[in-house]
Image (tube, rainbow, N blue to C red):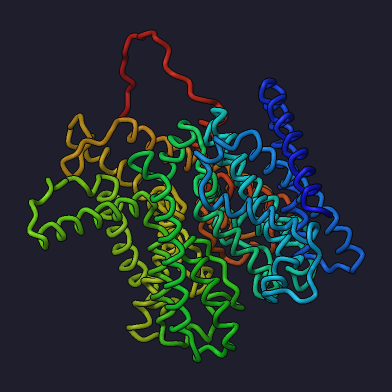
């Protein structure tokens, strides 16, 4: 084609585009309507893209089925390209101001997928490996999946901007992942043998709610792909669905509303809006770092000593580090951590896993506070090193929540270790050396507070030991952590309130700070609802399972409601109704019954009316 003709065609095309843009810009409602339609189609395409990818990954396919699936991927590609081009033509100024560089990379990658349609694969490309990547099916599917994830996260954030109650969004997000996970775990490539939907739903609920109870044997049921899916569900449930969603929305687009940012600020415990993304990065980075270091520690503690191949050791280490940090309690080892090969080792694996469990149960607000303390300390040291005037020291940088949680956790841990050793040293720990007894006492006093790992059979515990263990389950870890229970913060609040009442004081104080009345009220409500919920679940379970031992049923209910995962061995014997009841208990324990009730009933302020005050007779 002559150059002059090519230029003429290009100019005519550019003129047509300009006229189209000019026409639509004078009709703002048309642009808005088209944009909303594209957003809806894009969101539906994103859901379809994720479903297609899962089917592509988890099922065996013949060539005809692959071609059919690729046609759908091409359709989704067309919808995404249309949205990107529309935004570039009519909303480019907003995009330039608010879109982050990573989102640009995804959009450019999406446009790059058009290369095979524009320019066929060359016979002799300049860079062979680059051509192989750009013209491959995996590159197309990977870019579409990346765009789908960002699009879904952005849609969730936009839903938050509709002033929807955060508790309802959180609960709904957990339910969505539970049901998605229940179907994923049933895929042929995820299981070594078929499993029923109720069992798959139970395991998915237990994973997302980071409990650890299972009606099937994980080691003999799931393939490496199934373990990967299970690990992803545990990670999402442990760190929280909204943490991941907020991170992707802020990191990829950055154009969330002020209301959204205020909600995210409260969720990730950031001091101000400007530090939202750094705080999210810190939480995710800390979690991944602890899990990576923990996996290395677990591998070093078992390498060459438990009869596993190198690949099996790596999978064991990664899976158990993830499960321990998220306080999930799942194990891919036959018999779990009570396996004889582990029990006969040098016990270092139990010490490492205990440390990982403790790191996960500290709580993200405390981790954020630790970061602030570290930054403040480094600044002071740097000022002294450079002989600059020191900044005014913040004497209260270690906040009250951190102090109360750490002191209470330490006290509960020490008391639990001593009690377990005293009660079980002539029972389940009998015949072990002093070193092994104390390591097992530490391990079995750490895990009942949420992780659910067991190294000795809980069914062999003394009745008094079971009572102590259930009390630990009820307490759990620190608030806003991966642990379950009513939390050590709640225990500290009710004990401090009790101390105030006994001493005849009017204000609840700790560390020269007065605890807010609202916190005391919420602590009392959490304790009351936890006891009432446990009572109703136990009664219902005893009615559904009259043939099972009562002690085992009560222990199972406590373990499920407070998302621990320990069992006396009856989980696999439960009927379908009992499994569904236990799924509900795990869900309520993870999202928080009070948070769910607040989300359902809404925020109802007191009426502007004063009533006469009277006292109740309370002995």
Figure check: 300 above or below 2: below
The residue located at (65%, 51%) in the rendering is 147
Q: What is the x, y in percent for residue 359?
A: 38, 63
Which quadrant of the figure has residue 219? bottom right
- For the N terminus, give its image quadrant: bottom right
In screen coordinates, is 385 left or right of 467? left
Q: What is the x, y in percent for residue 168?
A: 57, 35
User: In this view of the protein, which residue sits in the foreground, 32 or 318?
Assistant: 32
- For the C terminus, give its image quadrant: top left
The residue located at (72%, 72%) in the rendering is 132
Figure check: 96 above or below 612: below
Image mark count? 0
Q: What is the x, y in percent for residue 160?
A: 55, 34
In screen coordinates, is 374 left or right of 86? left
Given the current orientation, which residue lies at the most extreme right position? 64
User: In this view of the protein, which residue sits in the foreground, 381 or 126?
Assistant: 126
User: In this view of the protein, which residue sits in the foreground, 416 or 165?
Assistant: 165
Q: Can residue 614 be seen in this view?
A: yes
Q: Can residue 542 be seen in this view?
A: no
The residue located at (30%, 30%) in the rendering is 517
Q: What is the x, y in percent for residue 402?
A: 28, 50
The residue located at (37%, 45%) in the rendering is 275
């Amino acid at each position: 084609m002559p150059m002059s003709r090519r230029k003429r065609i290009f100019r005519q095309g550019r003129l047509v585009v300009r006229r189209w843009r000019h026409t639509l810009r004078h009709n703002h409602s048309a642009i808005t309507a088209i944009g909303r339609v594209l957003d809806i189609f894009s969101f539906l395409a994103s859901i379809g893209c994720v479903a297609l990818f899962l089917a592509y990954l988890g099922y065996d396919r013949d060539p005809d089925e692959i071609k059919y699936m690729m046609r759908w991927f091409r359709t989704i590609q067309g919808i995404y390209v249309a949205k990107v081009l529309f935004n570039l033509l009519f909303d480019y100024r907003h995009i330039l101001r608010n879109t982050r560089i990573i989102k640009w990379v995804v959009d450019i990658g999406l446009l790059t997928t058009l290369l095979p349609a524009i320019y066929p694969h060359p016979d002799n490309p300049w860079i062979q490996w680059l051509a192989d990547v750009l013209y491959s099916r995996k590159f197309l599917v990977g870019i579409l999946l990346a765009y789908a994830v960002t699009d879904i996260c952005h849609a969730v954030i936009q839903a938050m901007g509709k002033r929807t109650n955060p508790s309802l969004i959180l609960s709904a997000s957990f339910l969505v992942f539970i049901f998605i996970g229940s179907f994923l775990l049933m895929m042929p490539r995820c299981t070594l043998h078929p499993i029923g939907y109720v069992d798959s739903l139970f395991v998915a609920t237990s994973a997302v709610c980071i409990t650890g109870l299972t009606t099937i044997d994980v080691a003999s049921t799931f393939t490496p792909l199934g373990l990967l899916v299970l690990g992803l569900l545990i990670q999402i449930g442990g760190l929280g669905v909204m943490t991941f969603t907020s991170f992707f929305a802020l990191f990829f687009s950055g154009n969330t509303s002020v209301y959204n940012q205020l909600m995210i600020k409260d969720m990730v415990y950031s001091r101000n809006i400007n530090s939202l993304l750094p705080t999210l990065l810190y939480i995710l980075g800390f979690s991944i770092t602890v899990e990576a270091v923990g996996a290395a520690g677990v591998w070093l503690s078992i390498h060459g000593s438990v009869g596993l191949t190198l690949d099996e050791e790596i999978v064991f280490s990664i899976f158990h580090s993830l499960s321990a940090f998220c306080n999930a309690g799942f194990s891919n080892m036959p018999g779990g951590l009570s396996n004889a090969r582990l029990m006969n080792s040098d016990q270092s694996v139990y010490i490492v896993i205990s440390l990982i469990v403790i790191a996960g149960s500290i709580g993200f607000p405390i981790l954020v506070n630790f970061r602030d303390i570290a930054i403040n300390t480094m600044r002071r040291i740097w000022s002294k090193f450079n002989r600059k005037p020191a900044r005014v020291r913040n004497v209260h940088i270690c906040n009250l929540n951190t102090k109360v949680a750490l002191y209470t956790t330490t006290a509960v841990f020490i008391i639990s270790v001593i009690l377990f050793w005293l009660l079980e040293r002539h029972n389940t720990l009998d015949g072990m050396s002093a070193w092994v007894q104390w390591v097992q006492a530490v391990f079995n006093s750490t895990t009942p507070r949420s992780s659910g790992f067991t190294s000795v059979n809980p069914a062999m515990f003394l009745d008094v030991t079971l009572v102590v263990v259930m009390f630990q389950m009820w307490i759990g870890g620190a608030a806003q952590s991966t642990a379950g229970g009513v939390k050590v913060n709640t225990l500290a609040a009710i004990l401090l309130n009790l101390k105030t009442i006994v001493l005849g004081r009017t204000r609840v104080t700790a560390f020269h700070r007065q605890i807010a009345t609202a916190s005391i009220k919420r602590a009392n409500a959490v304790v009351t609802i936890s006891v009432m919920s446990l009572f109703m679940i136990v009664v219902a379970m005893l009615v559904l399972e009259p043939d099972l031992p009562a002690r085992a049923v009560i222990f199972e209910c406590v373990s499920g409601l407070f998302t621990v995962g320990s069992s006396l061995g009856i989980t696999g014997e439960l009927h379908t109704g009992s499994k569904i009841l236990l799924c509900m208990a795990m869900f309520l324990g993870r999202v928080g019954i009070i948070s769910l009730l607040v989300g359902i009933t809404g925020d109802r302020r007191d009426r502007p009316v004063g009533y006469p005050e009277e006292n109740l007779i309370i002995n």
